[in-house]
Amino acid sequence: MLLKYSASVLEFCTICGKFEDPKNIITWVKCDICQRWIHEQCDSRKHDISVPIESSNVFYVCPICSINFDVHTHLTKPTESPTKMFGNGLFQDINYYRYSKKSLSNYVVAIYDYTYDLTIEDYMTLNACQYISNTLFHTCSNIFLNCTNRTDIKIWSIFKTCLMFYNLKSLEYTFFKDEFFQDKLLHHVNIIPILNNSHFTLIIIVFKNFTFQYIDPMGTEFSIVADMFKRFAKELNFDTANIKIINVDHCVQKDGYNCGIYVLHFIQCTINNLDLTSPNNPDQERDRLKKILLEKSKDVKEYCLKCGRKVTEADKCFQCHKCKKFIEKGCLITDICPLCKIYTEKKG
């Protein structure tokens, strides 16, 4: 009876009972399942578990819902996470970071100073039997090079090379006139990945040795190499007559979706002066790449999980007690704990 005749409590703090406009998101947070608001300062747990992360989704744990929907009880008692972490604040478990359309449409997994940040959408393309994204390919290849001390290698942007060979009209005219381009071409080992019709291939040019290689993971025929060389030479203003077109032995792709994995393998072998025929297990390589992407990230603990922006003292954020990552309130689209999430999915 007491519950039945109570006035609406949806706009009153769950703990202290104080009324305040729920639109004031600076001091209020809300649980999706019970629709109750709570003052941040009234949550005795404070920021210890304000935004726990389960399966890489960000949720606010309402104190009441965390008790009533007791599926992951460890969320109510902050303890040291049993999952090992890298020093940069990312979990070593490659399966920790997942994608959920319902809870968090996209978020930043890892951050780098020298290449694109890694989003969960790109990260998940490393799952089995998927074509890897060109952004992930670009990030991996730059990480390979950044991990070495070699300054004689240049990896061309895959976003430019596909235009150069297959859609030249869309490539800015200054690309071939740029001094950096000419320097990159003449004085370095040129690693040129190409993506065309969802298929990755690779060109390696060494002007010091006057060699041109075209590598198709599915198997390279000399006629194809010659054709690609003609396309390449057509766009250059200097003499390529002395360049030798060579075939190179390499391990061969045996499926229809791992071309990007093979080309990344060839790039790493080239950087480390390894034989391209060295065995390549695509499934193991996908897991290894996930590990590398996480390990080589800069410290992410002070960057917003959703947008990847560096958190400042002026920002209003939550911090996860498990991974210590922050998320800005503006990026927290769904304030729902995993327990409530499971409950609502079952009810729906």
Image: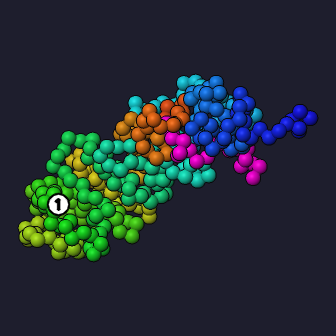
Q: Residue furthest right?
A: 1
Q: Residue at x 85, y 36 (%)?
A: 6
The reply to whether residue 185 is in sight is: no
Q: Is residue 128 above or below residue 85?
A: below
The reply to whether residue 159 is in sight is: yes
Residue 81: image quadrant is top right
Amino acid type at mark 1: Phe
Q: Residue at x 51, y 40 (%)?
A: 327
Q: Magenta includes 307?
A: no
How many discs appear?
1
Q: Residue at x 55, y 52 (%)?
A: 105
Near-viewer residue (184 or 11): 11
Near-viewer residue (285 or 327): 327
Q: Magenta includes 339?
A: yes
* Pointer 1 local density, CA inside 10 Å: few below 14, some 14–19, many at least 20: some
| Residue stretch in magenta | 326-348
Residue 47: image quadrant is top right
Residue 207: image quadrant is bottom left
Image position of 306 (left or right of 215): right
Near-viewer residue (229 or 80): 80
The spot of residue 179 in percent (x, y) is 13, 60
Q: Is residue 26 above or below residue 117?
A: above
Q: Which residue is mark 1?
A: 181
Q: Secondary structure at mark 1?
A: helix
The spot of residue 317 in percent (x, y) is 52, 36
Image position of 243 (left or right of 320): left
Which quadrant would the N terminus be assigned to in this image? top right
